[in-house]
Image (cartoon, grey):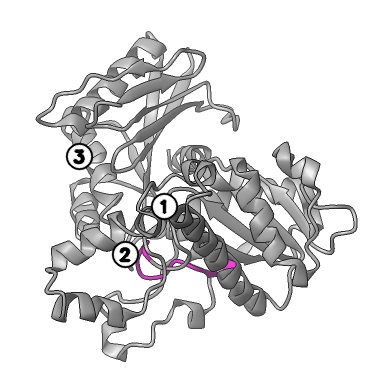
Amino acid sequence: MSEFILALNCGSSSIKFALFDAATLPRAPAWRGAATAIGSAQAMFTQTGAVPQALATDASDPYRSALAHIRERVRARLGGERITAVAHRVVHGGAKYFDPVRVDAGVLADLRSYIPLAPLHQPFALEAIAELLATQPDMPQIACFDTGFHRGMPAVEQMLPLPRALREHGLQRYGFHGLSYAYLACALGERYAERARGRTLCAHLGSGASLCAMRDLASVATTMGFSALDGVMMNTRCGALDPGVVIHLMQIRKLSLDEVGHLLYHDCGLLGVSGISSDARELLAREHEAPAAEALALYVHRIVRETGALVAVLGGLDMLVFSAGIGEHSAPIRARVCAGLRFLGVELDADANAANAPVISAAASKVLVAVEPTNEEWIAARAAARLL
């Protein structure tokens, strides 16, 4: 009888899941799926090899209802086979948790205290953990932290220019998307060997977005810092912002703390600048409209600008890697970013880029440009297997 590890990746309106054979841990899961647009009329359930289906959830608690639906589908899929552990992507472990850890009531309480640091993701991962602790208390649950990959950054990259006493309260730069970067480090080392071990910059461009500078496939700098608001502009998040703007919003515009938080996480980025959509695909289709064109221009500009800063830290660039939803699938965005990096010797192969090929740089390019799909669920499952 086979045994499996279930990996859960819980966001504010979606839950991705994947089942991995616990004995062999192949990178391609035995089965995967997702509940998306939870709580809306567009809620869907997708799974490997099946047509997407509308997802009916309890209006009073749609997220818990979606979790229950996934558990039922997983049980049906497994038949009599067994899950040995559940691996969770948890965005923030604060200054206490960086390595994967088995969650008990004490750990769960600690992790809840970090919800203000990652309000879009932390509550939902913890809700899934709490639900399973209540219903299956003997099931090992492993929390895998997005901050862990960046723990080894130089001390100067982890510091904030604040009074020293605040560092003791956890105010420092953590970095995020660590499970994605951990996978990229693994895959790039296998595929490109020594080339990837040089000065590599990875761009995780999804609904959340960040860049990570790597040397010898380890993080040396990243654009997100204390929270997942920092760095490049995102779908609905602002990215790096003059803190004076926050003071202005509260002092002059009289926004409350909650209103400012909602604005910066939900109403900025591509959505805020365009006033049209947070979806880059829709904005590209409507680029003849000035607001859409402006939003895309700022999005690309901020990526190029942050790339320049990280290249300075690296002392040059040998390899540029695009990953996550936009990074893996949007040839126009990749082309525009690369056009802004021509000064580094980046030259794109237009046909390869249009085909989302693994290597999209031209033969004459001084920088190897690659597209590498991420696999956060496998990284989490591997971490869980190592703790069993």
Q: Which residue is mark 2?
A: 94
The residue located at (58%, 57%) in the rendering is 203
Residue 216 appears in view: no
The residue located at (49%, 60%) in the rendering is 294
Does residue 385 sit above or below 112 in this rendering? above
Q: Circle 2: is it few (<14), some (14-19), or many (20+) Cα within 10 Å?
A: many
Mark before the other along the chain sequence, 2 or 3? 2
Q: Main secondary structure of the magenta part?
A: loop
Q: In this orientation, which residue lies closer to the viewer: 66 or 30? A: 66
Does residue 181 sit above or below 77 in this rendering? below
Which residues lie in the magenta part? 219-229
| Residue 264 found in image quarter | bottom left
Does residue 64 sit above or below 261 in this rendering? above
Instruction: Say what amino acid the circle numbered 2 marks.
Output: Gly
Distance from disc 1 to disc 2, alpha carbons, whole Å, reads: 25 Å
Distance from disc 2 to disc 3, alpha carbons, whole Å, reads: 19 Å
Dot 1 and dot 2 residues touching (CB under 8 Å): no
Name the element at disc 1: loop
Instruction: Say what amino acid the circle numbered 3 marks.
Output: Ala
Q: Position of residue 130 (x, y in %)?
A: 20, 39
Which quadrant holds the C terminus? top left
Q: Which mark is residue 130?
A: 3
Mark before the other along the chain sequence, 1 or 3? 3
| Residue 214 found in image quarter | bottom right
Name the element at disc 2: loop
Instruction: Say what amino acid the circle numbered 1 marks.
Output: Asn
The residue located at (41%, 17%) in the rendering is 52
Q: Which residue is mark 1?
A: 235
